[in-house]
Image (spheres, coloured by chain):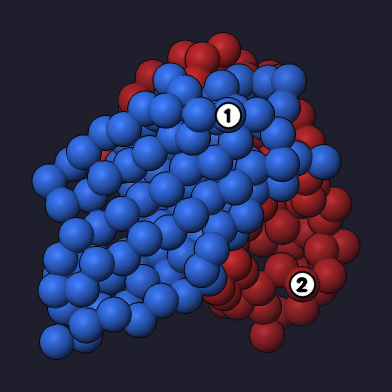
Chain colours: A red, B blue
Amino acid sequence: DGGITQSPKYLFRKEGQNVTLSCEQNLNHDAMYWYRQDPGQGLRLIYYSQIVNDFQKGDIAEGYSVSREKKESFPLTVTSAQKNPTAFYLCATQSPFYSTDTQYFGPGTRLTVL
Amino acid sequence: GQQVMQIPQYQHVQEGEDFTTYCNSSTTLSNIQWYKQRPGGHPVFLIQLVKSGEVKKQKRLTFQFGEAKKNSSLHITATQTTDVGTYFCAGPKAGTASKLTFGTGTRLQVTL
């Protein structure tokens, strides 16, 4: 949403392959988040990061990994350990971190594992 | 753990009818936020309510925050086809202002 890019929009992978989803932001926001959304469902938090080189597990971190080497970037890797990876993945930012400010979402990546 | 439920899960109305979705949290919230997600799109922030009993309006949309700060509602007057989408409420996870718990969502379908 204005300043947050996720690529690709659609991604197809074979079962057993790791795949990395990109999330880039130019909003200069400190906090970044990854959510998973299944059809007809709400948003579930996978990982989040407060600052560079620091990140925390969310509610459903198993089978996923992240890195935060730059403030602008927060890539998510879906590993082969994730049992049901097919879903809509949303990246979001929030600034400042220790506040109740709103979250801004990227356009999302739809991952389908064949 | 903290749970945020919304009812109904789905509602289908004819254009011009009113619509209301209700959000209920298992814990007291410091604030409640509402987001709209169009079909195929991503959630977009609509509004934030902070005070007990607060009411805010955005054109045909009226948002309320309950007195106990555990529930909220979104009412749309005279729906239009542009209102189609899923409406989510969200509140800070208990003990932290940095993470949000999203409600289960209410999907609104509007037909002519």
Q: Is residue A16 above or below residue A2?
A: below
| Identity, as a three-letter code, of the amino acid under mark 2 | Asn
Residue drawn at 15 percent across, 66 percent down = B78
Q: Callout 2: residue from which chain?
A: A
What residue is disc 2 on? A84
Residue type at the position of mark 1: Ala
Label 1 resides on the chain identified as B
> In the structure shown, which secondary structural element does the residue marked by tag 1 occupy?
loop
Looking at the image, which is closer to me, B101 or B9?
B9
Q: Which quadrant is the C terminus of chain B positioned in?
A: bottom left
Q: In this view, does B51 lie to the left or right of B15?
A: right
Q: Nearer the viewer, residue A93 or A52?
A: A93
Residue B97 relative to residue A46: left or right: left
Q: Is residue A78 above or below residue B18?
A: above
Which residue was labeled with disc 1? B68
Judged by depth in the image, the label closer to the viewer, 1 or 2, is 1
Q: In this view, does B12 lie to the left or right of A20?
A: left
Q: Position of residue A61 (x, y in %)?
A: 79, 47
- Screen quadrant of the N terminus of chain B: top right
Residue B90 can be seen, yes or no:
no
- Callout 1–callout 2 Cβ contact below 8 Å: no
- Residue count near mark 1 (Cα–Cα under 10 Å), binned few <14, some 14–19, many ≥20: few
Image quarter of residue A67 = top right
Task: Name which residue lies at 16% across and 52% down.
Answer: B60
Considering depth in this image, is B52 or A45 the residue closer to the camera? Answer: B52
Residue at 71% across, 41% down: B26
- Under circle 2, the secondary element is loop
Name the residue located 71 percent from the left edge and 68 percent from the top edge.
A85
